[in-house]
Image: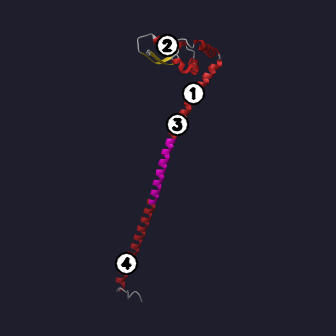
Amino acid sequence: MPILYAVVARGATVLAEHSAAATNAGAVARQVLERLPGGRIPFAFLEDIHGKFVKTYGRAALTALAYAMNDEFSRVLSQQMDYYSNDPSADQINRMRGEISQVRSVMIDNIDKVLERGDRLDLLVDKTTTMQGNTVRFKRQARRYRSTTWWRNVKLTAALILLLLVIVYIALFFVCHGFTLPTCIR
C-alpha cells in the first residue's frame, strides 16, 4: 500500500504537507493535531509501545496473523495508555528527555564552535610563526644594512681625512718650496 499523505507539524501548526491523491487526509490530520495533548506524551507513548512490542515479539511480528498478539499485548497497551494518560511523572520524564535533548544539541553546537575556534587558533599560530620568521629575517637584514652603512661611513671618513691631508700637504708644498718642505722645517 503506498503512502498517500505526509505532514510535518509543530504542535497543531502544520509546517509542510504533501498529498499524493485527492483525499481529505489534510483536514483529518489537522483535526487530529488540534486534539493531541501538548508536549511529547503521544510520541513518547508510541515510542515506548514500539520498543516493548519489538522487544517482546521481534521478527515474529513480520509473519504473524491478524490479532495473533492481541491477547498478550493488549494488557501492555492498556497499562501504557493508563500510565501516559494519568501518571504526572510520564510528562516529567518526557519533559526531562526533551531538556536532555536540547542540552545535547547545545553541547554539540558548543563543541562545533570550540573546534572552529581551534581552527582559527591554528591559523593564528601559523601566522604568528610566519611573522616571527619575518621578524628574524628583518632583524638580520637591518643588522647587515647597519653594518654596511657603518663601513661605508668609515671609508668615506677615511677618504675625506686622506683627501684633507693631501690638500694640506699640497698647500704646504707650495708654501714651503718643495717636497721635503725645506723652508718650513727649520
CA distance separating discs 3 and 1: 18 Å
Read off the magenta span: 118-140
Q: Nearer the viewer, mark 4 or mark 1?
A: 1
Q: Residues within 10 Å of mark 1 (few under 14, many from 20)?
A: few
Circle on res. 56? none
Identify the residue position indicated by label 4 in the image: 166
Residue in view at x 65 percent, y 20 percent: 89
Q: Is residue 127 magenta?
A: yes
Residue in view at x 47 percent, y 11 percent: 27
CA distance separating discs 4 and 1: 96 Å
For the question of whether residue 31 can be seen, the reply is yes
Residue type marked 1: Ser
Nearer-N-terminus badge (4/2): 2
Identify the residue position indicated by label 3 in the image: 113
Q: Nearer the viewer, mark 4 or mark 3?
A: 3
Q: Relative to 186, is 70 on the left or the right?
A: right
Q: Position of residue 44 (x, y in %)?
A: 58, 20
Q: Is residue 128 magenta?
A: yes
CA distance separating discs 1 and 2: 27 Å
**Which of the two residues, 176 or 85, is positioned nearer the viewer here?**
85
Q: Position of residue 2 (x, y in %)?
A: 43, 15
Q: Position of residue 144 (x, y in %)?
A: 44, 62
Residue type marked 4: Val
Q: Secondary structure beneath disc 1?
A: helix
The majority secondary structure of the magenta stretch comes to: helix
Residue type marked 2: Arg
For the question of whether residue 77 can be seen, the reply is no
Q: Nearer the viewer, mark 3 or mark 1?
A: 1
